[in-house]
């Protein structure tokens, strides 16, 4: 394991300005937090995050990333809290650690193979800051390096498969080829042990050849050839890594012997011009294999990769592959985006990699891709940036649902299934009951609570943002609103008819329609339901002169408060426990008699219910309507026991244009007494100002909402 000073020296070697004190704090914090936890091989647990940090120093990453690597398992696996991390290491490190922790959670909950591609996209999107992803990949790489210590074969296989399906492609996607190759080799060893053994054995034999290191010989021959022609080259040779050989053997149905490019050589030459010169020298010396030459300098790969590739027929009729590139191209090829930054920074003078913000890395990415050959290629690689407007959430079964940013459980429900959307009555996010208007965050697990009795509600139009949800809600509302108003209208109509002084003649209704200039009964019922006609007007139309008998003209339904989100005619009541006022976020709770109780969202009664509730709890998403004029709030005011105190309270409340509805004296003692006051206010804002004014008064000790 790397010692503290070794790790920090490594960082300082490439970034003398790194925050040494922070790195020291991180090291000590991690060692303390992980305490006596052990890894599968018996090593202390903290050796793992330290090694992960060590891997990242090879990429010359900045001090915040290194600190994040050191701390990456502390929040998930120890008693350390995000607040603590933020306090000790600052907001950036806290945000990065949080990102890695979230990725680990997702990792733990998905085992669905079909979701592999989805999960890759998700991981990309989650890592809004690509440094999060780099830490996660280094974490996975170290876990793969120590995989053989895990005793259970099924667990080793599962981790290896996940690495093969998700992390290696992800590393490839962002151009971290060294990570990709090592992960694939280690996973291959687990997944296909026999194939792995036989291929590595053959590679060994090939390398040794007839008494000597064949690769080294061919390599030095190549260097000599180029040097004589005046091209100074650094040549390295290697076999293809075992997994890529295995894949080629399978794809092309050929044997190990038939593979043309098991040995590959790389010549790093000073300039782009030298690349082409070296190519000419090589092609003149050995015959090239037709169809194998690729010029990725004039046409870079989609991810920005640049090099010349060719295969030639070398001695003993053996084919070898040769890559030609400059040092800059090499750095980018090996460590992808990370190298791109490091290299640019090095050119600019500063040694360390320090991406300033998310915007910067996206800009960098787009810059790299500027040279992409086709619009499709560009699109493919800016998709990472495009994921920034998407969020990914999970069903309770772990299925991934992709939604635009700002989506709510309503959108989620309709994305899963139209029926689920239509019947949604509430939602649990990460196990907690939330209103349907809650904005879903990346990585949330969303459970939609449904009821067969539910239908799409008008208020949903304000909380849904996806086209699919909006279209389904509108369609349903158009169909049902008419029905509902007619049903309500008929009830009210029957009620009016009952109040007429005499039974109604059969023709009376048609006469009334004529008097009211309405085309048919449905129109009449709708007008009644919508309160466009008062009871008295209907009575007069049905039986002229009868309205006088109905003593007081029934006013339209009380308009002091209106609640949206309920079907017309549904009774509701503001809860006595929390006294919500306009401006408070509210939620409806269906009572056994089908009436609705409206609570403030943070009401303790709801929290108690949520604790015990099964999925049957009938939550209704409601909002204050435009017609709302005010509601009654309950406040408690503690005042000094002195003459005139109550009068002073009344004056302040009056100045704020609030009405005292009720006042009760509580907890009287010699110095203070507490007044429970019900005040009618216009909205929560007015109430806040009133409370502030009360607190400002000299004889008031405390004033707050109950
Ligand atoms: Mn870890």
Image (cartoon, helix red, strand yellow):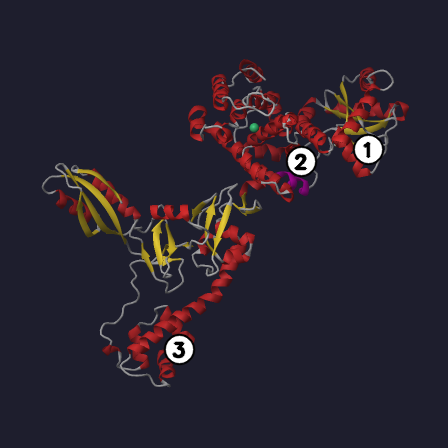
Q: How crowded is mark 3: few (under 14 residues within 10 Å), some or many (20 or more)?
A: some
Is label 1's Cβ within 8 Å of ligand 1?
no
Closer-to-camera residue (491/617) = 617
> Where residue 359 appears, x then y in whole percent?
54, 34
Q: Name the residue under label 3.
A: 518
The residue indicated by pointer 2 is: 161
- Quarter of the image where ligand 1 sits: top right
Quarter of the image where one finds residue 41: top right
Task: List the single residue furthest toward the front.
Answer: 152
Query: Residue 342: horizontal and vertical position, in percent?
Result: 60, 24
Q: Which of marks 3 and 1 is nearer the N terminus?
A: 1
Identity of the residue drawn at 52% across and 41% down: 443
Q: Are discs 2 and 1 less than 8 Å apart at CB? A: no
Left or right: 393, with 556 as reference point = right
Q: Marks 3 and 1, Cα distance to the nearest angstrom?
A: 83 Å
Q: What residue does disc 1 label?
A: 292
Q: In which quarter of the image is the N terminus?
A: top right
């Amino acid at each position: 394991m790397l010692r503290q000073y070794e790790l920090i020296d490594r960082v300082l070697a490439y970034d003398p300005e790194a925050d040494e004190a922070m790195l020291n704090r991180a090291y000590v914090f991690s060692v303390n937090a992980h305490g006596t936890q052990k890894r599968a091989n018996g090593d202390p647990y903290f050796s793992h995050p330290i090694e992960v940090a060590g891997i990242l120093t090879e990429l010359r990453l900045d001090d915040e990333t290194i600190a994040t690597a050191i701390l990456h398992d502390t929040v998930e696996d120890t008693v350390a809290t995000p607040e603590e991390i933020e306090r000790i290491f600052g907001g950036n490190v806290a945000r990065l650690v949080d990102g890695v922790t979230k990725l680990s959670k997702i990792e733990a909950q998905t085992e669905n193979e079909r979701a592999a591609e989805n999960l890759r996209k998700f991981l990309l999107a989650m890592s809004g800051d690509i440094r999060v992803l780099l830490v996660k990949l280094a974490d996975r790489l170290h876990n793969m390096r120590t995989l053989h210590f895990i005793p259970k074969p099924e667990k080793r296989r599962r981790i290896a498969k996940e690495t093969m399906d998700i992390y290696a492609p992800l590393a490839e996607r962002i151009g971290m080829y060294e990570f990709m190759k090592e992960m694939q080799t280690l996973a291959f060893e687990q997944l296909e042990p026999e194939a792995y053994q036989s291929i590595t054995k053959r590679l060994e034999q090939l390398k040794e050849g007839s008494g000597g290191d064949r690769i080294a010989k061919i390599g030095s021959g190549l260097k000599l050839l180029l040097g004589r022609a005046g091209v100074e080259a650094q040549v390295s040779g290697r076999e293809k890594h075992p997994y890529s050989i295995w894949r080629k053997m399978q794809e092309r149905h050929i044997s190990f012997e038939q593979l043309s490019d098991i040995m590959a050589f790389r010549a790093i030459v000073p300039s782009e011009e030298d690349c082409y010169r070296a190519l000419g020298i090589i092609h003149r010396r050995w015959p090239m294999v037709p169809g194998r030459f690729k010029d990725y300098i004039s046409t870079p790969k989609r991810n920005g990769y640049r090099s010349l590739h060719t295969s030639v027929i070398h001695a003993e009729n053996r084919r070898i592959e040769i890559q030609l590139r400059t040092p800059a191209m090499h750095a980018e090829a090996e460590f992808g985006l990370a190298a791109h930054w490091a290299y640019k920074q090095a050119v600019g003078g500063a040694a360390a990699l320090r991406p300033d913000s998310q915007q910067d890395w996206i800009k960098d990415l787009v810059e790299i891709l500027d040279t992409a050959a086709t619009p499709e290629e560009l699109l493919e690689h800016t998709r990472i940036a495009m994921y920034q407007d998407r969020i990914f959430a999970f069903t309770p079964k772990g299925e991934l649902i992709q939604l635009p940013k700002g989506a709510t459980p309503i959108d989620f429900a309709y994305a899963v299934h139209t029926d689920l959307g239509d019947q949604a009555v509430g939602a649990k996010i990460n196990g907690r009951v939330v209103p349907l208007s809650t904005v879903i965050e990346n990585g949330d697990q969303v459970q939609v609570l449904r009821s067969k009795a539910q239908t799409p509600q008008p208020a949903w139009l304000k909380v849904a943002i996806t086209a699919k949800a909006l279209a389904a809600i509108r369609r349903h509302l158009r169909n049902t609103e008419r029905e509902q108003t007619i049903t309500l209208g008929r009830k009210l109509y029957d009620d009016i008819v009952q109040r007429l002084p005499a039974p109604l003649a059969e023709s009376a209704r048609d006469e009334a329609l004529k008097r009211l200039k309405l085309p048919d009964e449905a129109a009449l019922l709708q007008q009644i339901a919508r309160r466009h006609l008062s009871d008295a007007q209907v009575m007069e139309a049905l039986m002229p002169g009868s309205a006088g008998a109905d003593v007081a003209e029934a006013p339209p339904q009380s308009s002091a408060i209106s609640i949206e989100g309920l079907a017309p005619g549904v009774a509701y009541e503001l809860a006595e426990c929390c006294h919500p006022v306009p401006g408070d976020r509210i939620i409806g709770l269906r009572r056994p008699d089908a009436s609705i109780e409206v609570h403030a969202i943070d009401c303790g009664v709801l929290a108690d219910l949520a604790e015990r509730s099964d999925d049957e709890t009938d939550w209704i998403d409601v909002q204050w309507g435009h017609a709302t004029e005010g509601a009654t709030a309950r406040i408690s005011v503690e005042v000094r026991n002195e003459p005139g105190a109550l009068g002073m309270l009344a004056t302040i409340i009056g100045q704020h244009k609030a009405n005292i509805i009720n006042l009760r004296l509580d907890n009287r003692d010699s110095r203070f007494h507490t007044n429970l006051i019900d005040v009618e206010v216009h909205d929560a804002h007015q109430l806040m100002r009133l409370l502030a004014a009360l607190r400002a008064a000299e004889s008031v000790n405390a004033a707050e909402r109950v």
